[in-house]
Amino acid sequence: MRVLGIDPGLTRCGYGLVEKTGRKPVALSAGVIKTSPDLEVPQRLAEMQAEIRDLLIEAQPTVVAIERVLFQVNVSTAMSVGRASGIVMAEAVNAQATVVEYSPNEVKQAVTGWGGASKEQMEQMVKAQLNIDVPLRPVDAADALGLALCHLAHAPTAAAIAKASERGKISS
């Protein structure tokens, strides 16, 4: 399974591609897509859309795991994250990838075992699980890899539920 984690943002959009074919997941790539705050929002969105489209073509993920925005104090930040999330979701669907969303606490719980983990603890656990020995900067790349790992942790349970539901053992 190939999972592209996305930590959405208009100024910085983190991405991390993880593949799991055996027991241990492997990081294939990670980075950040940036747009200039000097540009108008429509131009920034168009730039980001083109970058995401290219990334999806190159990465060929089966799943795109994106961080769900639950609450933001700053309305402007929430709007830009929401816009970025929408672009990622639409492009992922167009690329035939399944889209899943996870809250920050779900990601922290899956990766570190504690939903209140710090950014530093998250980065350390992401690096440990993926055998990465260099700092992941900006931290948005580590967050995106964490999203991919979160999905890999949840996927077996989701698959078992889907299979049981198909057999009629679970009703919706």
Image (cartoon, grey):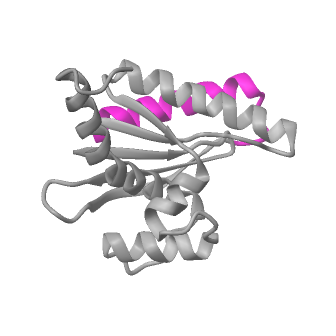
Task: Say which quarter of the image contains residue 44.
Answer: top right
Q: Quadrant of the N terminus?
A: top left
Q: Is residue 18 visible?
A: yes
What span is in magenta? Answer: 36-61
In this picture, is 97 found above or below 118?
Answer: above
| Residue shown at the point (73%, 35%) measured from the top left | 80
* Residue 32 percent across, percent down from the top left: 53, 52
5, 170: nearer the viewer: 170
Work out which residue is located at the far left of the displayed protein and give it. Answer: 22
62, 48: nearer the viewer: 62
Task: Say which quarter of the image contains residue 132.
Answer: bottom left
Left or right, 68 with reference to 50? right
Left or right, 152 with reference to 71? left
In this picture, is 70 found above or below 109?
Answer: above
* Residue 68 percent across, percent down from the top left: 60, 40
50, 1: nearer the viewer: 1
Left or right, 154 with reference to 10? left
User: Per the image, is 60 magenta?
Assistant: yes
| Residue shown at the point (77%, 41%) measured from the top left | 37
Characterize the magenta stretch by its predominant secondary structure. helix
* Residue 64 percent across, percent down from the top left: 40, 37
| Residue shown at the point (21%, 65%) measured from the top left | 24
User: Per the image, is 67 magenta?
Assistant: no
| Residue shown at the point (32%, 39%) measured from the top left | 158
Q: Quadrant of the C terminus?
A: top left
In this picture, is 115 found above or below 102?
Answer: below
Left or right, 42 with reference to 102? right
Q: Is residue 61 visible?
A: no
* Residue 27 percent across, percent down from the top left: 31, 61
Work out which residue is located at the far bottom of the displayed protein and give it. Answer: 133
